[in-house]
Image (cartoon, rainbow, N blue to C red):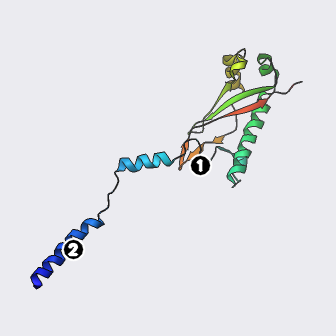
Amino acid sequence: MKKVLAFLTLLTFLQSCQYFEKNVPSKEELLQQELKRINWKEVDEYPSALPCDSIIDKTQRKQCFFDFVTQHLQEKLANDTIRSIYKRPDTLHVRVIVMPDAQLVFQSYFKVDSLAFDSIKADSILQSKLVDFPAIEPAIKRGVKVKSEFIVPVVLKKN
């Protein structure tokens, strides 16, 4: 009787081990789940310029950065060269691309209704005027420096 009881106990114990098995997802499944959770349209930290580095609040730091870039673009582009190309001297939209290696790329950005604007000439002027633009640290996503792109409206001053 003891042998039968011991055998049944052992059999029950071995059978119950199957209840504790957990299905471990594969690496690929975990990767796909994590990639779906990541918001690829937002960065953890926006690009930053030297005057904005001391600001801790993310929203204020972002605003400081955009104000800094807008101010420097307006200072460097507020002359008659751009205004002579741009027939309506009010606002020029500049696409600013901050590469992961902190390199800056500036391109003119205009909507469909302003096709009269000579983008090639404007881009060459942007490149020549913005050569010595202050250093900007790239955006950070999950601890990695990433490329970021944004459009800054530059108000051209009327004389």
80 lies above or below 51:
above
Residue marked by disc 2: 13
The quadrant in which residue 84 appears is top right
Residue occupying image coordinates x 14% and y 80%: 6
* Mark 1 → mark 2, Cα distance in angstroms: 50 Å
The foreground one among 52 and 62 is 62
Mark 1 or 2: the one toward you: 2
Q: Residue placed at 15% from the left, 76% from the top?
A: 8
Q: CB atoms at circles 1 and 2 under 8 Å apart?
A: no
Residue 33 visible in the shown view: yes
- Quadrant in which the N terminus appears: bottom left
**Image x and y of residue 86, in percent:** 77, 19
Instruction: Name the residue located 74 percent from the left edge and 31 percent from the top edge.
Output: 153
In the image, what residue occupies the spot 70% across and 25% down?
126
Q: Earlier in the sequence, mark 1 or mark 2?
A: 2
Circle 1 sits on which residue? 44
Above or below, comparing residue 92 to residue 7 in the picture: above
Considering every residue shown, the one lying at the far right of the view is 159
User: In the picture, residue 115 is in which quadrant?
Assistant: top right
The location of residue 97, given as percent across then percent down, is 62, 33
Q: Amino acid at mark 2?
A: Phe
